[in-house]
Amino acid sequence: MNLDNTIAKRKHKKIYRDGDKCIKMFDESFSKVDILNEAHNLAKVESLNIRTPELLEVTMIDGRWAIVTDFIEGQTLQSIAKNDMGKLDEYMDQFVDLQIRVHNERCPMLTNLSDKMNRKISQTDFDATTRYDLHTRLAGMERHDQVCHGDFNPSNVIVMPDGDFAVIDWSHVTQGDAAADVARTYLLFSLRGTEEIAEKYLDTFCEKTDTAKQYVQKWMPIVAASQSVKAIEDEREFLKSWVNVVDYV
């Protein structure tokens, strides 16, 4: 495989294009279990009525694990919006509509979101009282079976040449309450220092789906705690500040 064309760099991994293939290469520190789980998730979401990368193979290249998918031609919604901020409202509508399409899908083989978050909360370094409070909050939330991407942000949305959309990077996908997925996206916007855009996103989603903002906000401490486990230090401190939010009015 040709690894000359690097198209993205992430923590512990690099992504290459080789013709009509996309190669995600992981470094030696990345868990084999996590890599195989990501590949398994990709295979599961291929059944959705949304364009996703087609899993071609899981292999080793120069002693490192790699996931190979087809390459989806197009630009990320993030790059398009960044170059044309005057159409932010239009792009936000498209972004939210696509996320709603994802949530309307069902994929019974996926891991349950609440089960995953319970495990993550147990792995945090919060004191026992805080962990107990988070577990109790999570137990009080209704269980759903909506497809939740887990990292839904404009850099994971590809606008294809025909104008349709594809969604990439399904490594964190679960089935559960869409509001938790929305809370995650809100926190991702906030992490990038775009509070105004985060609020616009939440307002847009809640208006389109007739969802109370307070319901999404109830998920935020739970989601922040679960995401803090593998976050880098700066992000971990930000997420911890959300865990300390007791209630919303």
Image (cartoon, grey):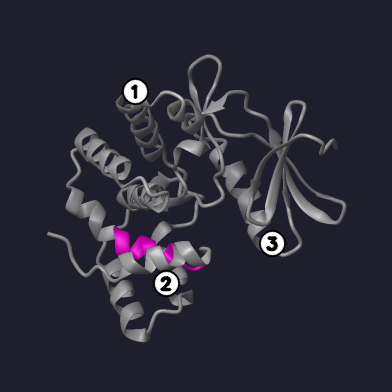
Q: Quadrant of residue 92?
A: top left
Marked residue nearer the N-terminal end (1 or 3): 3
| Residue that lies at the very extreme toward the bottom in this rendered image | 128
Q: Which residue is rendered at x = 86% and y = 56% of the image?
A: 63
Is residue 223 highlighted in magenta?
Answer: yes
Q: Tag 1 or tag 2, which sits nearer the N-term?
A: 1
Of the pair 83 and 72, the residue shown nearer to us: 83
The x and y percentages for residue 89 are: 30, 27
Q: Residue 4 placed where, x, y %? A: 82, 36
Neighbours of disc 1 within 10 Å: few (<14), some (14-19), many (20+): few
- The residues colored magenta run 220-230
Q: Position of residue 199 (x, y in %)?
A: 26, 44
Q: Which class describes the residues within 10 Å of circle 2: few (<14), some (14-19), or many (20+)?
A: many
Numbered disc 1: secondary structure: helix
Tell me, for residue 121, which label it has, or none: 2
- For the residue pair 76 and 67, the one nearer the viewer reads as 76
